[in-house]
C-alpha cells in the first residue's frame, strides 16, 4: 500500500463507517492512526498498549520524557483515568469539554499502561470533533499527540500529517482542514493551584472566567 492509499475520508458521517472500521481495526492491532480534531490533527495509538505508544513516540521522533496526552470520548471518563481531580479543574472541564482544553491530572495508580515518564500524571482532553469522538467511542481512550515530527509545524490537514509521518501510520482519517488550527491549552491540576502550562486554543482570560489559573510567566498569582 502506498502512502496515498492509507487516507480515508471522514468528512461525512453518513459515509465514514468503513473508514472508522479500518481505523478501529488498526488501533486494535497496535498500529497508529491519524485523526482530525478541533485543534490540529493528531496521531493516535491505544493508550493501554505500551508498544503502540512507543511506536507513536518513535514516529514523532520523541523520547519517553515527553509522554503523549490521552483523548477521551466522554467527560465521565475523567474519573476512570484520573484521581484527586480538584473542583476547580472539574469546573474548567465542565465548561470547556469537549474543546481545546487539556488538563494534567494525577493518574489512577491501578491503570495498566505506559505512556512514558509521566511521574504519575496524565494529560486528558475530550476533543470537539465528530469524527474524533466517533472513533474514541469505539476504541476507548487513545494516546494522541500532534501529527507531526517533533520540531516541525503541527499538521492542519491529513496531507500535512502524511507528508511528515508517512508509512509509520496505518490509517489517515481525512476530515478536511482542522477548524481550530491552534493546539489545545494545557493546564496543570496536580498541585495546590491550577497552573498554565501552554497557552493555546482557549486564552487565559477565558479560563479565568471559570477558575483561577496561575500563569508562571506573570511571576505571581492571577488577580
Image (cartoon, grey):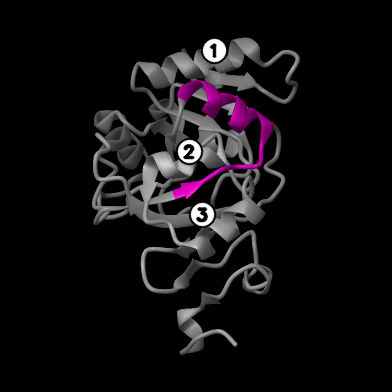
Callout 1: few (<14), some (14-19), or many (20+) C-alpha neighbours within 10 Å?
Answer: few
Query: x%, y% of residue 33?
Result: 47, 27
In the rendering, which numbered label is found on residue 142?
A: none
Q: Which residue is mark 1?
A: 21
Q: Secondary structure at mark 2?
A: helix
Q: Which x, y percent locates residue 3?
A: 50, 22
Above or below: residue 45 compared with residue 40: above
Which residue position is annotated with label 3? Answer: 102
In the image, the segment drawn in magenta is 124-139
Kindly indicate whether the residue at mark 3 contacts the one at mark 1 (C-beta within 8 angstroms).
no
User: Which residue was labeled with disc 2?
Assistant: 77
Of marks 3 and 2, the one in the foreground: 2
Residue located 48% across and 38% down the image = 77
Residue drawn at (64%, 62%), measured in percent from left and top? 202
Q: SS for tag 1?
A: helix
Residue nearest the viewer, comparing 157 with 134: 134
> Badge 2, how many Cα within 10 Å: few under 14, some, many 20+?
some
Q: In this rendering, which labeled residue sits more in front, label 1 or label 2?
A: 2
Q: Quadrant of residue 54?
A: top left
Amino acid at each position: 500500500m502506498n502512502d496515498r492509499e492509507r487516507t480515508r475520508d471522514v468528512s461525512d458521517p453518513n459515509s465514514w463507517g468503513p473508514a472508522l472500521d479500518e481505523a478501529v481495526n488498526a488501533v486494535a492491532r497496535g498500529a497508529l492512526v491519524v485523526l482530525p480534531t478541533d485543534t490540529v490533527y493528531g496521531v493516535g495509538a491505544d493508550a493501554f498498549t505500551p508498544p503502540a505508544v512507543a511506536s507513536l513516540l518513535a514516529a514523532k521522533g520523541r523520547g519517553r520524557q515527553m509522554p503523549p496526552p490521552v483523548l477521551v470520548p466522554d467527560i465521565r471518563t475523567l474519573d476512570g483515568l484520573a484521581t484527586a481531580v480538584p473542583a476547580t479543574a472539574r469546573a474548567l472541564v465542565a465548561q470547556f469539554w469537549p474543546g481545546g482544553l487539556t488538563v494534567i491530572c494525577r493518574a489512577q495508580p491501578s491503570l495498566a499502561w505506559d505512556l512514558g515518564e509521566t511521574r504519575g500524571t496524565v494529560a486528558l482532553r475530550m476533543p470537539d470533533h465528530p469524527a474524533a469522538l466517533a472513533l474514541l467511542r469505539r476504541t476507548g481512550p487513545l494516546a494522541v499527540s500532534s501529527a507531526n515530527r517533533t520540531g516541525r509545524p503541527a499538521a492542519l490537514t491529513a496531507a500535512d500529517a502524511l507528508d511528515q509521518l508517512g508509512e509509520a501510520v496505518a490509517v489517515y482519517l481525512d476530515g478536511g482542514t482542522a477548524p481550530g488550527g491552534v493546539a489545545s491549552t494545557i493546564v496543570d491540576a496536580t498541585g495546590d493551584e491550577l497552573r498554565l502550562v501552554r497557552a493555546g486554543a482557549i486564552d487565559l482570560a477565558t479560563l479565568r472566567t471559570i477558575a483561577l489559573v496561575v500563569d508562571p510567566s506573570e511571576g505571581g498569582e492571577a488577580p
